[in-house]
Amino acid sequence: MKSRAAVAFKPGEPLKIVEIDVEEPKANEVLVKILYTSVCHTDAYTLSGDDAEGVFPAVLGHEGAGVVVSVGEGVTSVKPGDHVIPLYTPECGKCKFCLSGKTNLCGAIRETQGKGLMPDGTTRFSYNGEPIYHYMGTSTFSEYTVVSEISLVKVEDHNVPLDKVCLFGCGVTTGIGAVHKTAKVEEGAVTAVFGLGAIGLAVIQGLKQAKASRIIAIDLNEDKFELAKKMGATDFINPSTFDKPIQEVIVDMTDGGVDYSFECIGNVEVMKAALECCHKGWGESVIIGVAGAGKEIHTRPFQLVTGRVWRGSAFGGVKGRTELPGMIDDYMDGEIDLDSFITHQLNFTDINEAFDLLHKGESIRSILTY
Ligand code: NAD
Ligand code: DAO
Ligand code: ZN
């Protein structure tokens, strides 16, 4: 079938809206009509060419929602008409990772997903007869996309607004999950959040839910402070206004450091600061930001010897198929605010504008409607 898609033909170039061909889903695959997608910093990162796994030409996009059109042989968990959110972290429930009880990183389709291919090693997208690669097992920048059954979570209640819950496809789940599932923040904790994009703001919401006593919000762009305050941040710091390292500033203002910090930028120097602003003996820092290919983190090992802990979190440690439905319920019950993340509503054809707004720091999330 034909599908409108925003194709990343080459790194560093704007996406091109073209009509691509999309093949029918094969065994254990599902054809989804994407109704809404947003743009995350990770799409911008891959488009920039900095992502070692980035392959071109590709249909990017991993934060979306839509409706099942048809299913391939053997698909049992979804049917045509079902509302779904694609998951870049699938959940097969059977692999060593899923059964470990220790991680949300499913291994079932990891190898082919990282190469931009479906599990049988081929692609369902083409343009003028030439293959187009998939992205993160989701490719939400095409009106019709094919994904693995295990990369879909069903939205049972059709009253749930897909133009809002598409944000659970990445940013909001990642931030809130990192607080509850990765760090397991407890009531009264003193915390710091570096970077106030969608990920950092979602971390702040998670910290508010966890009843953190102090939420220090850090960004170079002070325009981000207003929304951070609305989400629950208590203190606001622009590192460029200090003439000493930001970790020292935070240690001084917290009687020795924070209990938990979260890096939501992807900058290895900020990751160092986030670790070093943690309290001696117990402070834990969670890396969420994705750094450029080849970058390495560094600190003096004594920082860890003296009890600080460095962790990382992908998709907030959340198992999409079993745990996202509970988060959707939390949204419907008013316990998660999605609306405040949506700063712009655009037509799908204006997708390059959504990237520009993200780069200029003017948007948190733009919702694109097909
Ligand atoms: P964003 O661009 O909207 O937000 C980043 C924020 O960091 C901006 O507000 C910017 O002003 C601020 N910033 C930049 N440099 C800074 C510095 N040196 N000091 C302080 N603030 C600084 O991005 P986003 O969509 O919120 O994504 C954030 C990061 O999280 C990205 O690296 C993205 O790839 C990553 N990410 C990770 C996961 C995961 O599962 N681990 C999931 C989604 C996104
Ligand atoms: O299982 O080896 C693996 C990798 C799984 C991919 C997890 C990616 C998380 C960070 C990227 C954020 C994307 C939005
Ligand atoms: Zn993302």
Image (cartoon, helix red, strand yellow):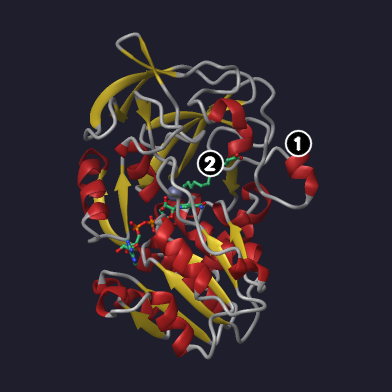
Q: Please report the residue visible at 65 percent of the width from the left and 55 percent of the height from the top.
A: 323
Q: Residue at x 25, y 60 (%)?
A: 361
Residue in the foreground of this view, choosing between 169 and 356: 356
Q: What amino acid does circle 2 point to?
A: Tyr
Q: Secondary structure at mark 1?
A: loop
Disc 2 secondary structure class: loop
Name the amino acid, label 1.
Answer: Cys
Figure check: 238 above or below 266: below
Residue 21 left/right relative to 306: left
In the picture shown, does residue 193 fall above or below 362? below
Earlier along the polypeptide chain: callout 1 or callout 2?
2
Give the crowd class for mark 2: few <14, some 14-19, many >=20 residues within 10 Å: many
Q: Residues within 10 Å of mark 1 (few under 14, many from 20)?
A: some
The CB of the residue at mark 2 lies under 8 Å from ligand 2: yes
Q: Where residue 207 sits: x, y (%)?
A: 54, 75
Tell me the quadrant of the picture where the C terminus can be found. top left
Can residue 247 be spotted in the picture? yes
The numbered mark at residue 330 is none
Residue found at the far top of this picture: 129
> Cβ(mark 1) to ligand 2 < 8 Å?
no
Residue 40: tell me if it is visible: no
**Distance between mark 1 and mark 2 Cα atoms:** 16 Å
Disc marking residue 88: 2
Q: Which residue is mark 1?
A: 95
Which residue is painted at 56% across and 82% down in the image? 212
Residue 64 location, x and y as percent? 43, 45
Q: In the rendered picture of this protein, how many numbered marks are placed on residues?
A: 2
Relative image position of residue 368 (x, y in whole percent): 30, 47
- Where is residue 307? Give x, y as percent: 67, 73
